[in-house]
Image (tube, rainbow, N blue to C red):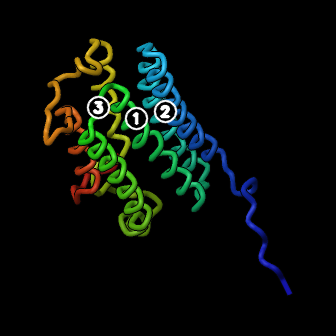
Amino acid sequence: MNRPKPFSMIREFHLADWFTLGNAFCGVGSLFSVMTYLQTREVMHLFYACALIPAALVFDVLDGRIARWRQQSSAMGRELDSLADIISFGVAPAAIAYGCGMQGLYDRVVLVFFVACGVSRLARFNITAEKLSDGGDKVKFFEGTPIPTSLALVLVLWVAAAQGALGDQLWFGKLEIGGFFLHPLVLLFALSGSLMVSRIRIPKL
């Protein structure tokens, strides 16, 4: 009786998957940089956190191109890609926003909403990718904005940090509602999350 061959992570790993891990490495590094900033208040660590997100995007773009070039794709690769993306383009940008001063109760609710939308967006993509590709090997359009568009939010936060607009100096100030605080700037994250889970169709280049 032939036993099914046990799953081997080493055999299943392809070159593109190492680039995907590079994406995750940048995302986790960004989180550590934010935590260091919160401990030391040295703004350079906040810049490091922001800089690692575009680096993650480079790895994210390259892993897909390498997979297509080598004609090596796998279910494991797709799952790795989604997990890396949620770290680098979901959790890390939310953590950077928190580090910049969006720490009120309503801010936290919005940031959790943003991350939840990112997770949902990636889950939807994973289960609809085959349908959206019309049987081909490449999706022709995105449904909802891709999660890496959060890079635009990180750029906004980088500019804010460069101008010293952090904490109590954050742009647009803060509102007190029912004894809890909301920084209006955090609403950009609410908008971004909503667009991710929308049905807007965006052609994939």
Residue drawn at (37%, 27%) of the image: 99
Q: Nearer the viewer, residue 85 or 114?
A: 114
Indicate the secondary structure of the residue bearing disc 3. loop
Q: x, y (%) of residue 179?
A: 17, 38
The type of residue carrying mark 2 is Leu
Q: Quadrant of residue 29?
A: top right
Q: Which mark is residue 24?
A: none
Can you identify the residue that label 3 sits on? Answer: 102
Left or right: 1, with 62 as reference point = right
Q: Circle 2 sits in a helix, a strand or a loop, which is it? A: helix
Q: Is residue 114 visible?
A: yes
The amino acid type found where label 1 is placed reads Ala
Precedes in sequence: disc 1 or disc 3? 1
Evaluate whether residue 152 shows in this view.
Answer: no
Measure the alpha-carbon separation of dots 2 and 3: 15 Å
Farthest-out residue, bottom: 1
Q: Which mark is residue 95?
A: 1
Q: Position of residue 159 (x, y in %)?
A: 29, 18
**Earlier residue among tags 2 and 3:** 2
Name the one closer to the observer, 174 or 22: 174
Separation of disc 1 and disc 3 at Cα?
9 Å
The residue beneath circle 2 is: 31
User: Mark 2–mark 1 contact, CB under 8 Å?
Assistant: yes
Picture layout, residue 17 above or below residue 157: below
Q: Quadrant of the N terminus?
A: bottom right
Eye-nearest disc, 1 or 3: 3
- Report, in whole angstroms, how far the alpha carbon at label 2 lies from the one at label 1: 7 Å
Considering the image in quadrants, where does the C terminus appear? top left
In percent of width and height, residue 120 lies at: 36, 58
Identify the amino acid type marked 3: Met
